[in-house]
């Protein structure tokens, strides 16, 4: 690349949101650059996928390859949640669209997506850290960045800049857009285990989510025999406890019913990792010359494993929107308003359901009813099916954006 290169679209970050947006735009014939801070494969949390991301993977031509990588097939989830005694759950096939998603090692999954973007013609520069946007008046026309091992500050110019920098939310910081959701102010601690007792049959790949009086655990079986076991708890409670996150994890694990049994006799094969898990939404998703997607736009608590799906479904809508804007620049505000409206409605719907689901004083029928009230108000489907559909992440965004295309 020359010192100052011009692209139709520059994407900050090569995670799922950035790679998918870039790949889909390249498929539409645009000149796209992805600048990614790390060298892939790189570690990332967020291993349990839901079927809402399958349409994007299908568009990118990745379903067969994903299958061939041998990831655990996830047919649904097992829950110890709310007032019900014992386990209950959902199966993706009840949502009638896709039978399964996957439990993945994100390093491999994300590398697959970034590699696919490259294959589709995207220029990908790894170990390139974006420093700041470049302005002409109030319009963003590119970014400055540096490559690892070099002090030279480079510039890449764009007609559209996509911020897919995840929880770095580069433009969110630049424009002061982040609004935290104080009721979802959590912290997550997790480790990897081997030798766990696993379910059999089509439940073998289930995520198991078990609530405790204040926090909850995830149990995610990966294809190499290790299991990701994580604990999420309110930050305030952790601070008040005077204990370390590792102490809380160990203490609380012993208080679980199902996950304690599944990890009995197993051994922890990694150290503990932890991350602030504090949900937020940006107040705007676009402005002159720029857009946000994935965690750069909003992060919703991992309770329903929606993060990668939100990023990939957002990418699909954004690639369509940017394609339209590049063809007809005078439509920029109108088209990107549609993108923001559709993406925000989907995020808000997930957020509303997460908030309801966090209330463990309910019975499973209450959660089913809530799902139905949100996504099937005329009660056209059984409420269990609406619950499965809600947890599959298959409602919203594309329907809204495709309405615009049809209009
Ligand atoms: C505890 C926890 C558990 C989770 N569990 C799940 C789960 O089970 N299922 C699920 O779907 N989601 C889960 N998530 C959410 C999921 O991890 C994210 O939503 C998802 O990774 C978002 O994808 P993204 O592409 O927007 O961002 P990311 O995947 O974070 O990618 C952003 C990329 O941008 C790069 N970058 C950042 N700054 C710069 C810069 N300045 N210049 C260049 N590159 C930059 C980063 O290196 C990174 O590769 C979880 C999140 C947490 C915190």
Image (tube, rainbow, N blue to C red):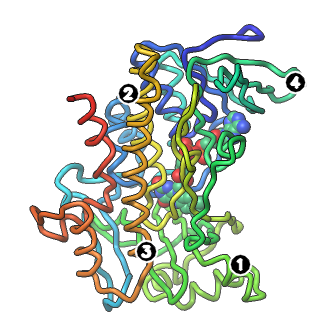
Give the residue number, with chain letter if any, for mark 1. 246
* Closer to the eye: label 2 or 3: 2
Q: Marks 4/3: CA distance?
A: 45 Å
Helix, strand or loop at label 1? It is helix
Point out which mark residue 209 bears.
3
Compare residues 381 and 206 and report the one nearer the observer.
381
Point out which mark residue 150 bears.
4
Q: Residue at x 57, y 40 (%)?
A: 15
Is 358 above or below relative to 168?
A: below
The part of the image, by quadrant, that contains residue 62 is top left
Q: Residue at x 41, y 58 (%)?
A: 348
Helix, strand or loop at label 3? It is strand
Q: Position of residue 312 (x, y in %)?
A: 43, 41
Of callouts 4 and 2, which one flags the residue occurring earlier in the amino acid sequence?
Answer: 4
Q: Position of residue 260 (x, y in %)?
A: 50, 85
Question: Is there CB contact under 8 Å for labels 4 and 3?
Answer: no
Of callouts 4 and 3, which one flags the residue occurring earlier in the amino acid sequence?
Answer: 4
Question: Is there CB contact under 8 Å for labels 1 and 3?
Answer: no
């Amino acid at each position: 690349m020359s010192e100052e290169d011009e692209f139709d679209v520059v994407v900050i970050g090569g995670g799922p949101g950035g790679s998918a947006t870039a790949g889909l735009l390249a498929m539409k014939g645009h000149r796209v650059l992805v600048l990614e801070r790390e060298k892939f494969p790189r570690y990332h949390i967020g291993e349990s996928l839901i079927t809402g991301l399958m349409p994007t993977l299908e568009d990118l031509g990745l379903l067969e390859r994903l299958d061939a990588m041998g990831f655990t097939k996830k047919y649904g989830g097992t829950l110890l949640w709310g007032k019900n005694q014992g386990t209950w759950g959902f199966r993706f096939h009840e949502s009638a669209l896709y039978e399964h998603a996957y439990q993945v090692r994100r390093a491999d999954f994300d590398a697959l997506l970034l590699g696919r973007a490259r294959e589709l013609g995207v220029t990908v520069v790894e170990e390139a850290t974006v420093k700041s946007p470049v302005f002409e008046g109030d319009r963003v026309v590119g970014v400055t960045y540096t490559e690892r091992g070099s002090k030279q500050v480079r510039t890449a110019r764009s007609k559209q800049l996509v911020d897919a920098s995840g929880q770095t939310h580069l433009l969110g910081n630049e424009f002061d857009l982040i609004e935290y959701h104080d009721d979802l102010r959590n912290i997550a601690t997790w480790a990897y285990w081997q030798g766990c007792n696993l379910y059999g049959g089509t439940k073998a790949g289930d995520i198991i989510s078990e609530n405790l009086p204040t926090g909850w655990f995830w149990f995610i079986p990966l294809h190499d025999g290790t299991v990701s076991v994580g604990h999420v708890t309110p930050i305030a409670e952790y601070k008040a406890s005077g204990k370390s996150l590792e102490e809380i994890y160990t203490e609380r694990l012993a208080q679980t019913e199902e996950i304690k049994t599944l990890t009995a006799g197993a051994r922890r094969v990694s150290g503990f990792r932890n991350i602030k898990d504090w949900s937020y939404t940006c107040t705007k998703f676009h402005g002159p010359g720029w857009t946000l997607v994935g965690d750069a736009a909003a992060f919703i608590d991992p309770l329903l494993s929606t993060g990668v799906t939100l990023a990939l479904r957002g990418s699909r809508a954004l690639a369509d929107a940017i394609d339209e804007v590049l063809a007809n620049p005078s439509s920029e505000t109108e088209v990107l308003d549609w993108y923001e409206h559709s993406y925000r409605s989907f995020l808000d719907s997930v957020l509303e359901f997460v908030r309801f689901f966090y209330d463990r004083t309910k019975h499973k029928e209450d959660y089913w009813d809530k799902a139905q009230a949100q996504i099937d108000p005329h009660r056209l489907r059984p409420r269990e099916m609406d619950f499965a559909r809600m947890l599959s992440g298959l409602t919203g965004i594309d329907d809204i954006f495709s309405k615009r295309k049809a209009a």
